[in-house]
Image (tube, rainbow, N blue to C red):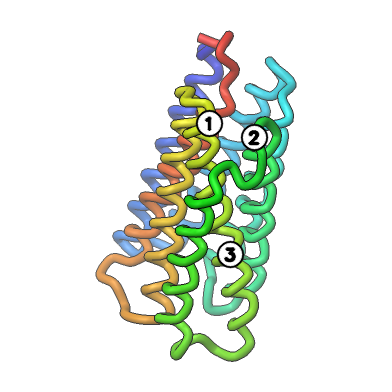
Amino acid sequence: MTRNSTALLGLAVAAALLAIAGTLVNNFWLIVFFKPLATLLLLLLTLRFLRRAKQPFAFWISIGLLFSLVGDIFLIQPDKFFLPGLASFLLMHLCYIVAFTRDARFPARWLIWLIFLAIAAASFFVLRPNLPPALMLPVAIYAFALSTMTAQAIGRFLLFHTSAAKLAAIGAVFFLVSDTLLAWDRFHTALLLAPALVLIPYYIAQLLIVLSTRPPSIH
């Protein structure tokens, strides 16, 4: 990577660590400032990669990160803005699905997709008794999109076996872990240090997906 790209990456990691630290010490202002800043810096890094090599994959990831940034802002106060935050991340996952289908068929692997849909259905069944009626359909749609995004990323890697596709697939799995922890904590059983447990795999996911957009020619 170039020096500027490396600096953006370093700043994004630092902001993510400070956001996580904010959740651990329950410092609202650290969270308010650094949680969206980390995503914004990752978005800027992706845009830098996109500018160097205009690829549809990086374009759709950057649009997804924009929705993710909006979702991060909403979910700073999840009790007030959970549904708008959920909608923002749903749009992000749809953008990622589009990105993962720019160079691969959909579904990339039928069996993997069906397995992840079954996992999503089982998770929804477990959470369903504690879901408010108004969230039943939104959560079901979100689970479908999340599982589809993850399955497509993994299937895409199995098609191409490139390092970039591998980064995106691992990132998608980390996203699934983050959202599963969030849903479990909110709708099933409260988890110790839940905000940090959710943010750590979330930022790993976004970081890996962003790095998967780096053009091979950039060193």
Say which residue label 1 marks: 159
Q: In x, y percent, where is residue 14?
A: 40, 37
Q: Are marks 2 and 1 in contact (CB under 8 Å)?
A: yes
Q: Amino acid at mark 1?
A: Leu
Amino acid carrying mark 3 in the image: Phe
Give the numbered dot on residue 104. 2
Residue at disc 3, secondary structure: helix
Q: Residue at x 48, y 23 (%)?
A: 162
C-alpha distance separating marks 1 and 3:
22 Å
Judge whether 184 appears above or below 1 on screen: below
Mark 3 or mark 2: whose residue is earlier in sequence = 2
Tell me whether circle 1 and circle 3 mark residues in contact (CB < 8 Å): no
Q: Nearer the viewer, residue 177 or 40?
A: 177
> Mark 2 is on which residue type?
Ala
Q: Residue at x 54, y 33 (%)?
A: 210
In the image, is 128 to the left or to the right of 103?
left
Residue drawn at the location 53% of the way across and 78% of the way down: 79
Q: Residue 72 at what x, y percent from top left?
A: 57, 57
Label 2 element class: loop
Can you identify the residue that label 3 sits on? 144
Q: Is the Cβ of the residue at disc 3 closer than 8 Å to that at disc 2?
A: no
Viewer-nearest of discs 3 and 2: 2
Mark 3 residue crowding within 10 angstroms, few (<14) / some (14–19) / many (20+) = some
Q: Position of residue 30 (x, y in %)?
A: 44, 54
